[in-house]
Amino acid sequence: MERMNSPLHDDDNDDERKGKVVTTTGMPALMDELIEEILLRIPASSLVRLRNSVCSSWRTLISSSQFAKDHLRRSMAVDPALTHPRIAYYSSSYSYPIIGIFSARSVFENPPREPTKVVAYEGRRCRSIIGSCNGLLCLHDDELEGRAMLWNPCTGFTSLPLKIGGLFNYCGFGYDHVNDKYKLFGTVIKKSGEFVTRIFTFGPKSKWRTIQDFPNRLHHPDNKASVVGWTGRFVSGTGTLNWLLCSGLDSFVAVLSVDLVKETYSQFSAPSRDSDDDRSVFPRLFILGGCLAVCCETKKTHWTLWLLKDYGVPQSWTKLAIIRKHPPLINYCLNDVLRPMYMLKSDVLLAKSPSGILILCNVKDGSISVPNIDSSSDGMTKHPPLYRGSGSRIFHVYHESLVSPSHFGLPSCSSEMRLFKPSL
């Protein structure tokens, strides 16, 4: 480093032989570019640990909004491993103010005897997870007419709670990539019983804005199709939140979308159900590898997993896997489908079975195994350990990033969510 900052000499230069020193210009700028390029290649969690132990110029760079965007863009496009995919979960049946988090990759990579460890965070009240986007989790609670806030588990920062003014019926969280805005969508049931559809744009001066009503029965001939699921699935790069529309009377299945950029609605066809399917078992919509995926029961003997390769183009629905129904994985009382969570290299799928067991399924040979996940420290004592069953835990996949609520004008703090310390 000292050599690079010292004067450069050229043995064949006449000026040097005459006793003059030749210097070059532009080196500090070049060094800054190299440093930034090196830092962009470091995982977000490592940068967070380094942030308070490096020089002020590096700390300023790592904490900047532009660096967070560049790091996210590079890691997702060039090296997804830098994003460190994580799975966050909460309890939907018991009032635990706790969110558990574990590494998605460790579930696939750890030897059978080496458990994947759960790290738990405790908040001031019980919260559900609406969705995730660019490393941010959108949390929601029903107290005081409902409140929502953003949290980046990697950096520890949260936004101040946003008052919703009612209870959510349908909702979703995503990113408007055209206008560089994070948005919360929801149909809200007000105290008066009135339904309103709103979008909130997170920022220093943003407020709830009422838009056209959510068309949860859009364009179906018998008008009996309904939305399946509470929260919309966000597809990165499209700016859309997506739900399934299904009819219990026939094979009608469609994807209903909210465009967060234009704030308009649309729909397109999803894979139709088989004529032998049980109509009480509705298909479900998921995100796998950044694409929409639909899992449905087929002929009562297996689950079929479809992937939408080209968003909005029904012809691009591709059959990704056919997974046989193993009896221990079925719960006939719930009438549910397999719920895919994360897929590694298009070979092994991590999923939640209808029986509540988390499984690793090799989609090529059909083999099934149960991952060893140590949830003993998550504080959810009324639930079974994750290696035995998920109970009523709800799971969300997110990717670590440096994005902070302060980057888009929101006051942020690090005191709302803290590491959970179980009592001895």
Image (cartoon, rainbow, N blue to C red):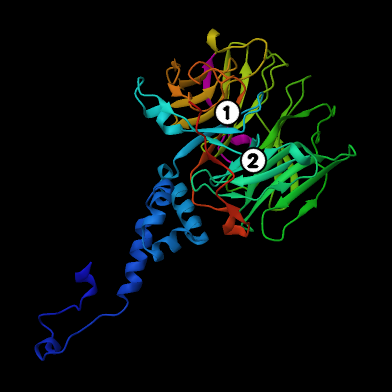
Is 345 a magenta residue? no
Foreground disc of the pair 1, 2: 2
Q: Mark 1 and mark 2: span between their CA atoms?
A: 29 Å
User: Label 2 crowding class (10 Å Cα cut-off): few <14, some 14-19, many 20+?
Assistant: many
User: Label 1 crowding class (10 Å Cα cut-off): few <14, some 14-19, many 20+?
Assistant: many
Which of the numbered marks, if any, corresponds to residue 21? Answer: none
Q: Nearer the viewer, residue 202 or 227?
A: 202
The amino acid at mark 2 is Leu
User: In this rendering, would 358 be left or right of 246?
Assistant: left
Is 317 a magenta residue? yes
Tell which residue pokes out farthest to the top in this image: 327
What quarter of the picture does the N terminus occupy?
A: bottom left
Residue at position x 83%, y 26% in the image: 224
Q: Is residue 307 above or below residue 203?
A: above
Q: Is residue 404 above or below residue 192?
A: below
Bounds of the magenta segment: 307-324
Residue annotated with mark 1:
306
Q: Is residue 11 visible?
A: yes
Residue annotated with mark 2:
139
Residue 126 in the image: x percent, y percent?
65, 34
- Mark 1 / mark 2, whichever is N-terminal: 2
